[in-house]
Image (tube, rainbow, N blue to C red):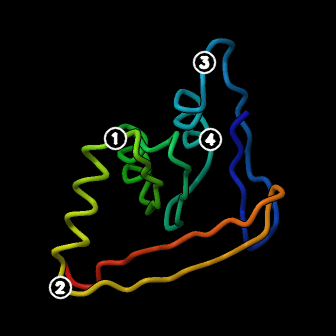
Amino acid sequence: MVSAWACENNLVLGQVKTEEKSNEIAAIPNLLDILDVSGNLVSIDAMGTQKEIAKKIIDNDANYILAVKGNQPQLLEHLQDEFRFSKQIELDKNEDLGHGRIETRICSVIADF
């Protein structure tokens, strides 16, 4: 099951059931098809970090934050290089207790493209 969650409203906006022998990657585009995400920020965990999903979000006039993990080494290396050689980086750190563990999220923003 893939769900779209509105953080500010604490509300599930939509859900799509994953097909048998399938995964979230196939269900996310279907969920994006039924939602009006234009003008909004879509965040997806590392499973959904796919070119086709990013393109669908852009085509729907939305912005995105996609997680990148070590299982996509070339993409991770490109991002690390971009941050390493960029002119100015802003960092924001958020720590939260969830799912029985402490979750730390660090967001790096390149201020000058």
Question: SS of the residue at dot 2?
Answer: loop
Residue under pointer 2: 87
Side of 18 where 99 appears, left or right: right
Question: Comparing marks 4 and 2, which lies closer to the viewer?
Answer: 2
Distance from disc 4 to disc 2, alpha carbons, whole Å, reads 39 Å
Q: Which residue is mark 3?
A: 22
Q: Residue at x 50, y 61 (%)?
A: 38
Tell me the SS state at disc 4. helix
Distance (Cα) linking label 1 and label 4? 19 Å
Instruction: Relative to 87, say whether 25 is above or below.
Output: above
The residue to which callout 4 is attached is: 34
Disc 1 to disc 4: CB gap under 8 Å: no
Of labels 2 and 3, the one closer to you: 2
Mark-to-mark CA distance, 2 and 1: 26 Å
Q: Position of residue 22 (x, y in %)?
A: 60, 18
Q: CA distance from mark 2 to mark 3?
A: 42 Å
| Cα separation between marks 4 and 3 | 19 Å
When the figure is inspected, residue 44 is found, relative to residue 92, above or below; the finding is above
Q: Farthest top residue?
A: 21
Mark 1 or 4, nearer chain start: 4
Nearest to viewer (mark 1 / mark 4): 1
N-terminal of the pair, mark 2 or mark 1, is 1
Spatial separation of the CA atoms under disc 3 and disc 1: 18 Å
> Mark 1: which amino acid?
Lys
The kind of residue tagged 3 is: Ser
Three-letter residue code for mark 2 = Lys
Q: Quadrant of residue 28?
A: top right
Question: On the image, numbered disc 1 is attached to which residue?
Answer: 51
Please tell me how crowded label 3 is: few (under 14), some (14-19), or many (20+) other residues with Cα within 10 Å: few
Q: Earlier in the sequence, mark 2 or mark 3?
A: 3
Q: Quadrant of the N terminus?
A: top right
- Among numbered discs 4 and 3, the one appearing first in the sequence: 3
